[in-house]
Amino acid sequence: MPAIDGVVRSDGEPLGGAYVRLIGPSDEFVAEIYTREDGVFTFHVVDGTWTLETRAAGAETATRAVEVAGADASVTVEL
């Protein structure tokens, strides 16, 4: 099953406890999670273009589009 694997970083360091929201290809809310202590998160998805919205205390919201097509997509979100 395809997945979006990523890490959230702030000033180059992994950021645990960051909020990551997954928005689907039709702009619908799908899921939300908090990153692990090492900043890592994973969403299991189907093929398509997904949007990640990442928020953390004291940082601007970061938005990133991710294209998933038959394989895993790996992203780094920098805050």
Image: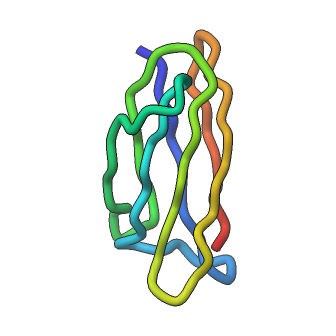
Which of the 4 quarters of the picture holds residue 76? bottom right
Q: Quadrant of the C terminus?
A: bottom right
**Residue closer to the observer: 35 or 50:** 50
- Up-down relation of residue 24 to residue 19 (above or below): above
**Residue closer to the observer: 58 or 11:** 58
Q: Residue 38: horizontal and vertical position, in percent?
A: 42, 67
Residue drawn at x 46%, y 15% is 46
Query: Which residue appears farthest toward the bottom when viewing the image?
Result: 58
Residue drawn at x 52%, y 89% is 58
Residue drawn at x 49%, y 69% is 55
User: Left or right of 31: which side holds 66?
Assistant: right
Scheme of colours in the image: rainbow
User: Left or right of 41: which side holds 76?
Assistant: right
Q: Residue 73: horizontal and vertical position, in percent?
A: 61, 31
Which of the 4 quarters of the picture holds residue 62? bottom right
- Up-down relation of residue 7 to residue 30 (above or below): below
Query: Which residue appears farthest toward the front when viewing the image?
Result: 27
Which of the 4 quarters of the picture holds residue 65? top right
